[in-house]
Image: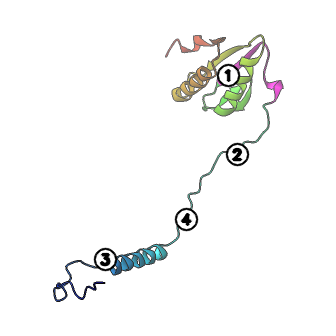
Amino acid sequence: MAMQVGTGDEGAPMMDINTTPLIDVMLVLLIMFIITIPIQTHAVKIDLPVDTGEPPPENLIDPVKNEVYITPGNEIMWNGTPIDLRRLRQYLDLTTQMNPIPELHMRPDPEANYELVDEVLAVTRRAQVQNMGFIGNELYINF
């Protein structure tokens, strides 16, 4: 049996860098960094609309014709009852489901805000109202 006693490079310096301690230090620093990050506890508050759940009263919808009047004070009236644009859309959706579909008469006041009249017309278009007419056009002769 032969036994090797030495390689001959025993006195030469080691040329490789030991990276194990460097990796250990980096892992410890990473863990410390993760621990010191503050927990995100703030929240963004959003006010969502609340659904009242009440269906529109059926007695406000006429099966023959309905009138939307826009007052000089920029108020929307459905058959004489003040409503907002959301309620107008609900009423229009109900009328488009009726058989036969009732007529919708638009009567904007000459002193009403044009933007509100435009918004009402946009709501009626989105509701796909088919039987609609303007009444009171003779009031606009001098405008």
Q: Could you tell me residue 104's position as x and y percent?
A: 68, 15
Q: Assess disc 1: are there few (<14), some (14-19) or many (≥20) residues with their C-alpha within 10 Å of its C-alpha.
A: many
- Which quadrant holds residue 75? top right
Q: Could you tell me residue 52's position as x and y percent?
A: 76, 42
Stretch in magenta: 57-69
- Pointers 3 and 1 in contact (CB under 8 A)? no
Q: Secondary structure at mark 2?
A: loop
The residue lying toward the viewer, choosing from 35 and 86, is: 35
State the mark number for residue 127: none
Q: Secondary structure at mark 1?
A: strand
Location of mark 2 (residue): 50
N-term mark: 4 or 1: 4
The residue lying toward the viewer, choosing from 75 and 13, is: 13
Q: Is residue 33 left or right of residue 6?
A: right
Q: Could you tell me residue 82's position as x and y percent?
A: 71, 32
N-term mark: 3 or 1: 3
- Pointers 4 and 1 in contact (CB under 8 A)? no
Q: Could you tell me residue 113's position as x and y percent?
A: 54, 29
- Which quadrant holds residue 69? top right
Q: Secondary structure at mark 3?
A: loop
N-term mark: 2 or 4: 4
Give the CA distance from mark 2 to mark 4.
24 Å
Indicate which label's residue lies in the foreground, 2 or 1: 2
Indicate which label's residue lies in the foreground, 3 or 1: 3
Q: In the image, what residue occupies the spot 66% across and 45% down? A: 49
Location of mark 3 (residue): 19
Q: Assess disc 3: are there few (<14), some (14-19) or many (≥20) residues with their C-alpha within 10 Å of its C-alpha.
A: few
Location of mark 4 (residue): 42
State the mark number for residue 68: 1
Q: Amino acid at mark 2?
A: Val
